[in-house]
Structure formats: C-alpha cells, structure tokens
Amino acid sequence: MSTRETEAQPDSLTELIEEGLAAAGILPTHLRVTQLDEQLRVEIERLIPVVQEQADQLNKGTTDWYLQQRVVDDAKRTLQDGPGNGLRSAAMQVRELARQCGALARYAVSPGDGR
C-alpha cells in the first residue's frame, strides 16, 4: 500500500462526497474505491435517520415532505446495490453513493448547524 493511499483520507464530508463524485472519471485504485464505498455507506447510514426524523416532523403529503422522503428512499435503494464486478462499475457505484450522501447532507443541515 503506498503512502498516498494510506494518507488519502478526506478531511470532511464535503471532500468525501467530492472525491466520490470524481471516482468515475479518472479511476482511483481498487483500494481507494473500496475505502470510498465504505466511508460513504457509513455517512449515508448516519444521515438517513437524521433526514427521516426531519421529514417526519413535516406535514405528510406536502411538497417538502415528499422531497425529503424521496431523498431518504433513494439513499436506501442505493445502499442495497453492490459495487459490481469491475473497477469501473465500483467507481460508478461510489459516484452514486456520493450523490446520495450529498443530497442527504443538504437536507440534514439545519439553521445554526454550521455545516
């Protein structure tokens, strides 16, 4: 394992999402794709209950409720998908995980949260 791979830990959720979104461009190493996949899944699993709780506080059937509920449902569906058989498919899955993580993070931000 190279020094670059061991030191390539993102400093923030934003950096993790950005790296995940870029993963399907110039392909990272298999190790890095695996790391991103694991990290993004952890973040999504952390954010889903936060956003779900917020959605549950909204009036069911309103536009805001539908938007937040859709983000939660889409993220749950994405977590069910595996990385696929090759590096390209794994990188594409990481990009989708990053997209879902970003959507959840946008809804999880509350006034004064500082994110």
Image (tube, rainbow, N blue to C red):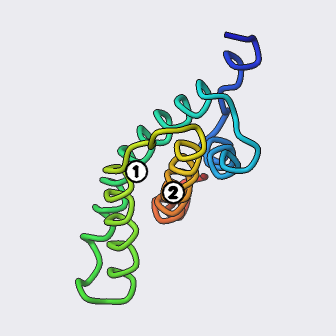
> Mark 1 vs mark 2: which is more N-terminal?
1
Left or right for 16, reference 76: right
Task: From the top left corner, tell me how far across and down residue 43 is, in percent.
Answer: 45, 42
- The amino acid pointed to by label 1 is Leu
At 33% from the left edge and 80% from the top edge, which residue is drawn?
A: 65
Relative to 82, 58 lies left or right: left
Q: Is residue 66 left or right of residue 11?
A: left
Total numbered labels placed on residues in the image:
2
The crowding category of the residue bearing disc 2, from other C-alpha atoms within 10 Å (few below 14, some 14 to 19, many at least 20), is: many
The residue that appears at 66% across and 10% down in the rendered structure is 1
Residue 108 spot, x, y in % from top left:
46, 59
Residue located 50% across and 38% down the image: 37
Q: Nearer the viewer, residue 4 or 65?
A: 4
**Residue of label 2:** 105
Q: Position of residue 32 (x, y in %)?
A: 62, 28
Q: Is residue 40 above or below residue 111?
A: above
Determine the CA span between mark 1 and mark 2: 7 Å
Q: Is residue 5 left or right of residue 44?
A: right
Residue furthest front as drawn: 85
Circles 1 and 2: CB distance less than 8 Å?
A: yes
**Residue 93 image point, x, y percent:** 50, 49
Mark 1 surroundings within 10 Å by alpha-carbon count, few (fewer than 14), some (14 through 19), many (20 or more): many
Dot 2 lies on which element? Answer: helix
Three-letter code for the amino acid on which mark 2 is drawn = Ala
User: Disc 1 on helix, strand or loop?
Assistant: helix
Q: Residue at x 33, y 81 (%)?
A: 66
* Image position of 63 with respect to 110: above or below: below
Of 87 and 40, the residue lying toward us: 87
Q: Which mark is residue 47?
A: 1
Q: Nearer the viewer, residue 106 or 103?
A: 103
